[in-house]
Image (cartoon, rainbow, N blue to C red):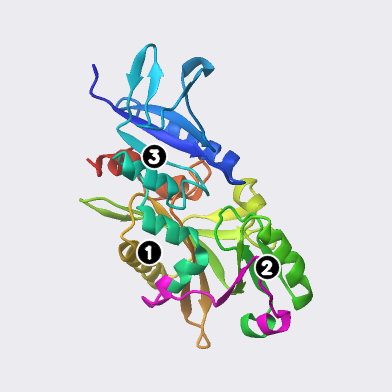
């Protein structure tokens, strides 16, 4: 290679209902990366159709043997993959396994952590063992019989019905009585074979980004999520139906506790790159704040209006430098 710039693939697309959201994140990342330092390409992965976007609208097919492509008669190899697929196969360990096989460094955690954080039910039960507070939940698999009354008694109403593994709030319903359970389950089962029924936590929803490198730990300011809809659904996430306040309106004591919990969870998981952890801050009987972990996003949205770019800005950091730190940490 004549120049010493690393070749970065922004890997996006995927096979889930979040394909278009992922493409928007890729455009965001493309605009953020330091072009003086890196050659940046967008690679769209959908099913077995993998291609790289070249200048002037041309595309080139990716050779899956080594994740390379042909450009002007030369074979181009990547040095690093920045994964921004939301959902299958980039957020569940599948893409990570492929990159492990071909020895290409990437931006997310490894196979096990990705698979586990993608399955909300498995993740909650794993982290509960480390003393992380999570909502009570029941797992249903497609075709299993269930007793609506028993579920309502255990989980309480209202509750949330959501696909056990998915993102972007597709297939999520807030259920207010046992009669609404069956229709909500039908919607969730359209997205996934496993569905989780989770107790409702009343409180303030916040979301906090974090990344670590060999040199430093950066816990970003939390964002408070005030949805205009019933809950933080797809419309709220991507079509602006929400008020987002960064930094979140928390007491200094609670803000410090949340930051410490975010850092602790990152270490428990042995995570890599930027992750975002969502919480509900509820109140106990004495009126004290209680930190409940909702879910973990290991490939958080990266459009200019997404939480992470907002939080990076609020921290007084430059997203360009943050991305360079994350890439260079692998070398």
Q: Residue 190: give its label.
A: none
In the rendering, at what x and y percent does residue 53 appear?
Answer: 48, 24
Q: Is residue 129 magenta?
A: yes
Q: Residue furthest top?
A: 72
Q: Residue 262: give its label.
A: 1
Q: Is residue 75 above or below residue 192?
A: above
The front one of 101 and 226 is 101
What residue does disc 2 label?
Answer: 143
Is residue 188 rendered to the left or right of residue 318? right
User: Which numbered disc flags the more N-terminal residue, 3 or 2?
Assistant: 3
The N terminus - image quarter: top left
Marks 2 and 1 sit apart, C-alpha to C-alpha, by: 36 Å
Marks 3 and 1 sit apart, C-alpha to C-alpha, by: 22 Å
Q: Give, as a single range, the part of the protein colored magenta.
A: 126-151
User: Which numbered disc flags the more N-terminal residue, 2 or 1?
Assistant: 2
The front one of 6 and 323 is 6
User: Which numbered disc flags the more N-terminal residue, 3 or 1?
Assistant: 3
In the rendering, at what x and y percent does residue 311 appear?
Answer: 43, 50
Residue drawn at (73%, 74%), measured in percent from left and top?
A: 176
Q: Mark 2 or mark 1, which is nearer to you?
A: 2
In the rendering, at what x and y percent does residue 259 appear?
Answer: 37, 64
What residue does disc 3 label?
Answer: 82
How busy is the neighbourhood of tag 3: few (under 14 within 10 Å), some, or many (20 plus)? Answer: many
Say what secondary structure mark 3 lies in: strand
Residue drawn at (44%, 32%), measured in percent from left and top?
A: 30
Q: Is residue 166 above or below residue 33?
A: below
Q: Is residue 23 above or below residue 142?
A: above
The C terminus - image quarter: top left
Quarter of the image where one finds residue 147: bottom right
Residue drawn at (34%, 49%), measured in percent from left and top?
A: 273
């Amino acid at each position: 290679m004549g120049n010493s710039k690393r070749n970065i693939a922004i890997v996006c697309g995927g096979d889930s209902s979040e394909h278009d959201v992922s493409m928007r994140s890729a455009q965001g990342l493309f605009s953020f990366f330091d072009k003086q330092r890196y050659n940046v390409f967008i690679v769209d992965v959908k099913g077995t159709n993998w291609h790289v976007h070249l200048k002037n609208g041309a595309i080139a097919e990716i050779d899956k043997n080594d994740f390379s492509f042909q450009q002007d008669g030369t074979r181009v190899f990547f040095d690093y993959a920045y994964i921004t697929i939301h959902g299958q196969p980039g957020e569940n360990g599948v893409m990570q396994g492929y990159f492990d096989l071909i020895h290409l460094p990437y931006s997310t955690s490894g196979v096990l952590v990705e698979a586990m954080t993608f399955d909300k039910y498995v993740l909650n039960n794993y982290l509960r063992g480390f003393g992380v507070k999570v909502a009570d939940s029941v797992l249903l698999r497609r075709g299993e019989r269930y007793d609506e009354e028993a579920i309502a008694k255990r989980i309480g109403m209202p509750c949330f019905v959501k696909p056990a593994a998915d993102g972007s709030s597709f297939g999520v319903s807030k259920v207010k009585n046992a009669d609404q359970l069956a229709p909500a389950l039908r919607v969730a089962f359209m997205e996934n074979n496993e569905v989780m029924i989770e107790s409702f936590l009343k409180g303030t929803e916040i979301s906090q980004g974090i990344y670590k490198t060999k040199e430093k730990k950066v816990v970003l300011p939390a964002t408070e999520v005030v949805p205009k809809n019933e809950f933080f659904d797809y419309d709220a996430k991507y079509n602006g139906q929400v008020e987002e306040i960064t930094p979140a309106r928390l007491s200094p004591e609670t803000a410090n506790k949340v930051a410490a919990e975010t850092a602790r969870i990152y270490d428990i998981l042995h995570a890599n790159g930027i992750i975002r952890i969502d919480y509900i801050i509820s109140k106990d009987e004495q009126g004290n704040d209680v930190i409940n972990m909702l879910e973990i996003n290991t490939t958080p949205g990266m459009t200019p209006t997404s939480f992470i770019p907002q939080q990076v800005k609020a921290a007084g950091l430059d997203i360009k430098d943050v991305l360079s730190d994350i890439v260079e940490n692998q070398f």
